[in-house]
Image: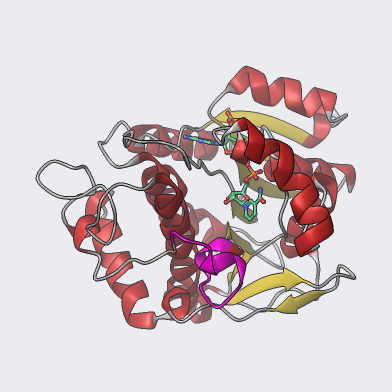
Amino acid sequence: RKGNVIVTGASSGLGLATAKALAETGRWNVIMACRDFLKAEKAAKSAGMAKENYQVMHLDLASLDSVRQFVRNFRQSGLPLDVLVCNAAVYFPTAKEPTYTADGFEMSVGVNHLGHFLLARELLEDLKASDYPSRRLIIVGSITGNTNTLAGNIPPKANLGDLRGLAGGLNGLGGSTMIDGGEFDGAKAYKDSKVCNMLTMQEFHRRFHEETGVTFASLYPGCIATTGLFREHVALFRLLFPPFQKYITKGFVSEEEAGKRLAQVVIDPSLTKSGVYWSWNNNSASFENQLSEEASDPEKAQRLWQLSEKLVGLA
Ligand code: NDP
């Protein structure tokens, strides 16, 4: 049978390029989990994806109810789940004020981490039940959360501190909208959320890999300077960022190339090792990369797991 893969945020950028790469193999049915149904349908059509290789299901990660409803809808479809890709993200580098999810969490961490945390926890049951030879749960990470890299050292740096803001509910009601309890900073909130993504992947691996056989992985696909992620940035930045990445840092990758990389983490028989953060060198060869101290701290991962469980209603 065909494999079934859910890709969140498959309506643009990396998610769309990955959906396209998987659909083109003819061996995968891609469930595009998107907040804007029509946009996703249009995107799939204009990417030339054949109807029999994908379907769109509504998912708004900014609402825990929507996440739960998505899980119910997916189960009703009767499809087995073989791979889950948590890819969607928002980024508000110039925001002066925080915005909030339906449940009142600061938006970047609410969507990028908490929404995905609930989704992945719920769907682990479905991955367990699948008879597919290689079942995988992939959470897209980033270099920007890794303070052991040049890019990760551009201020404001990621830092979860002692997670007091998260413990306080991350809603600004009497506490802070930032995980570390500090003042709101949109760029930092994004980086923090990516650290959460990488910590969560490793905690999944520690808790469930042996018992379930599921492969847990994260990756940095390269700098895809052209995606919608930078839509909130100032115009000058949007103009200069792609050539800067192309010619100065040489970290630039096209959406198509990045999509192929993520698709590799979904299907490549040589990338089945669990607990790994994949990266690619300039010749597009994959390697196991090192995470920064904070992004690989097992105690922080455990605390993050417990606090996140409380916030999404799992504990
Ligand atoms: P895009 O903005 O192009 O794509 C983000 C996707 O997430 C869109 O499809 C968007 O939907 C979706 N999304 C946003 N909010 C929600 C929500 N509430 N519910 C459901 N879906 C939502 O960005 P990229 O493709 O660049 O980003 C994809 C991933 O790659 C992210 O995890 C990002 O952190 C990571 N990444 C990106 C890098 C880059 O250089 N661009 C570098 C490293 C990592 P819609 O189409 O409706 O807006």
Residue 20 shown in magenta: no
Residue 55 rendering spot, x and y as whole percentages = 69, 31
Left or right of residue 177, residue 70 in this image = right
Work out whether 249 lies above or below 30: below
Magenta-colored span: 144-156
Residue 181 rendering spot, x and y as whole percentages = 22, 58
Left or right of residue 78, residue 171 in this image = left
The image quarter in which residue 108 lies: top left
Residue 249 rendering spot, x and y as whole percentages = 75, 63
Which residue occupies the foreground of this view, 28 or 173? Answer: 173
Work out whether 79 lies above or below 270: above
Work out whether 284 lies above or below 32: below
Query: What main secondary structure does the magenta stretch of the protein show?
Result: loop
Residue 225 seen in the figure? no
Which residue occupies the foreground of this view, 80 or 176? Answer: 176
Q: How many marks?
A: 0
User: Looking at the figure, which quarter contains the C terminus?
Assistant: bottom left
Residue furthest to the front: 236
Residue furthest to the top: 38
The image quarter in which residue 13 lies: top right
Quadrant observed for ligand 1 in the rendered image = top right
Residue 58 rendering spot, x and y as whole percentages = 53, 28
Q: Residue at x 90, y 70 (%)?
A: 283
The image quarter in which residue 83 lies: bottom right
Q: Residue at x 21, y 56 (%)?
A: 165
Q: Residue at x 81, y 62 (%)?
A: 250
Residue 154 shown in magenta: yes
Work out whether 151 lies above or below 262: below
Residue 241 seen in the figure? yes
Which residue occupies the foreground of this view, 86 or 120? Answer: 86
Q: Residue at x 28, y 41 (%)?
A: 105
Which residue occupies the foreground of this view, 145 or 307? Answer: 145
